[in-house]
Amino acid sequence: MLFLQSLISGLLTGGVYALAGMGMSMVFGVMNVSNFAHGDLMMLGMYLAYFAFTLLNIDPYLSLVLIIPLAFMFGYVLEKVFINRVIHHPHQNQILLTIGLGLIMSNSALLAFTSDPRILTTSYSSSSFTVFRDVSVSVPLLLSFIITCGITALLYLFLSGTRTGMALRATSQNREAAQLMGINVSRITAIAFGIGTALAAAAGALIAPTYYIHPLAGHSFLLKAFTICVLGGLGSVVGATVGGLIIGVVEALSSVYLSSDWKDVVVFVLFLAVLLFRPQGLFGKKGDQ
Amino acid sequence: MMKQAIASAFLVVAAIALPLLIGDNPYVTGILITLLMMATLASAWNIVGGYAGQFSFGHAAYFGAGAYSTMIMLSVFNTNPLVGMATGIVVSSLIALVTGSIVFRLKGHYFALASIAVAEIVRLTVLNLDFTGGAQGILLSDVAFLGLDLNSKNPFYYGMLSCLVVTLGITAYLRRTRTGYYLQAIREDQDAAASLAINIAYYKNKALLISAALTSVVGSIYALYIRFIDTTAVLDLRLSIEILLTAIIGGVGTLWGPLLGAALLVPLAEMLRSNVLGDAMVRIGIVSETSPIGMFFKDGLAHAHVLVYGIITVLCILYLPKGILGLLRRGK
């Protein structure tokens, strides 16, 4: 029963992780940039949800309607102003630029919101219902999982069904060829970063009701998002979905059967194991590592 | 070449004489020790990050390994500090070997990611074990070594200075050897280097091992100097990032860049921390002390040195990708 219980809560949390992982994978796939500010973008999403709730009295899940377009525009501008200039630079410079941007975000948040952790308590924060016998499901986790599924479905529809989505996939496959086919690659790149930012912020907002909200919360999520992407195969959006669910379950099981102190260690060891035995990830193509 | 040798000899003599000029001023000596420490750490990082082009985001693990080994050997086994230092070198070399053997067959950014993961594993392990003091850290009341007065700061000044001289010496030597050229070839084009039959994983590992051992020694001296360590002080990701930013902002892949970076950033951070800047702005009258902006500058800036590092990094990458040393060279 304990196993089933932790499996379910792991899958539910994993869904939200998957959302953050997809954002990072999208950026990596289209731009070939490892975004080290991803965790901090999630942190901004957490604070947006928090302030929408405390100041404007908007339910954190409902506030996604505002947060997603806002984060998309923020990411779009961020790409146009900063990231765009290093897109042809060596990897190290891209990593450093995103680290610098992340440091600016997290430390500005530290100055503005202080280092006191905040908690977003809704009327249903601690409510749960019993599925059968002693297996129960937490309401906020289930809600965020359902919303995650909705966002993922929309993302797949967008990528497969619209012209912009096809252009995104084409750019991800081969930047030069896409450009030759008349795709406005620089616009697509900004859109990709906007979507990546929107997904990160959405993931942040979705976990805000169940986590401590803190300016440096992004650090641990950044590593988790990387683990998810590498596990699924860098750049693969499908891979990130599966990777997120796996990481959620691994984390839940190891905190039950080992101890919650060691759950992050287990995740990072898994990350190194993937690099050692299958560096292309579960869904990645071999040869580019 | 000759000119550079004379200039460096002059610098070393000046650095040796400096404490005599300062006299008994623990505050200034303290800042100088931090400066030398960051310069050494950034120079050691530069061997693997600058010359081999493998950006490590986890050098805190090697620093912490040195610090923790020294403290544990001293407090539990009551050994000579040198035994602790040697243990630290062994431990950090092992960490480096594990990291290197997993990722050095892969390309650049995988090493960046793996180095963070390894450093976080080390940090969380130290935090969760008992004999490492866990979240409380380790406090050491008294140390004796060679009859030196370790309550004074001067021995540590000379200790850090020797580390810096050795690290810069090794860097200068490596640059002119086969290993140094191979490392730079790997940095410029890994595939081309491999096609010339350079054993890529071997040379990257070699660079990382040298870098890790030097970093670990600095960690040991730091532990003896502060005599209190915990995971936030010596194993945090923030320390890894400060080390690499110091090297980048000064000039990555150059001999003197990391030293220049430390000479700029450490006093800047100190000025922000001790609020010299905030006070000055109030005194000059740019902002009033009672206005919200004035209060922000007075209280907020004290915690803002990482924010300033972030801004400098972004500006550096966009406008000075070769660091400040690159800018100076271009001016010639």
Image (spheres, coloured by chain):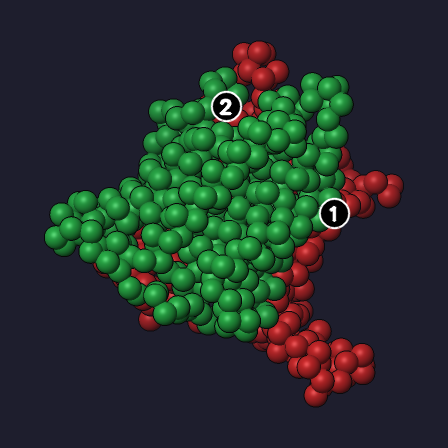
In this rendering, position of residue B71 left or right of residue B59: left
Q: Label 2: which residue?
A: A289
Q: Position of residue B23 (x, y in %)?
A: 62, 73
In this rendering, position of residue B322 left or right of residue B96: right
In this rendering, position of residue A277 left or right of residue A168: left
Residue appearing at x 31%, y 44% in the figure: A11
Q: Amino acid at mark 1?
A: Val
Secondary structure of the residue carrying numbered label 2: loop
Residue appearing at x 62%, y 74% in the figure: B300
Comparing B79 with B122, the one in front is B122
Comparing B282 with A101, the one in front is A101
Residue appearing at x 62%, y 31% in the figure: A162
Q: Amino acid at mark 2?
A: Gln
**Circle 2/circle 1 CB separation < 8 Å:** no
Label 1 packing within 10 angstroms: few (<14), some (14-19), many (20+): few
C-alpha distance separating marks 2 and 1: 30 Å
Q: Label 1: which residue?
A: A81
Q: From the viewer's perspective, is the residue at label 2 or at label 1 nearer?
A: 1
Q: In this picture, is B182 found above or below A186?
A: above
Which chain does red denote in the image? Answer: B
Q: Is residue B203 visible?
A: no
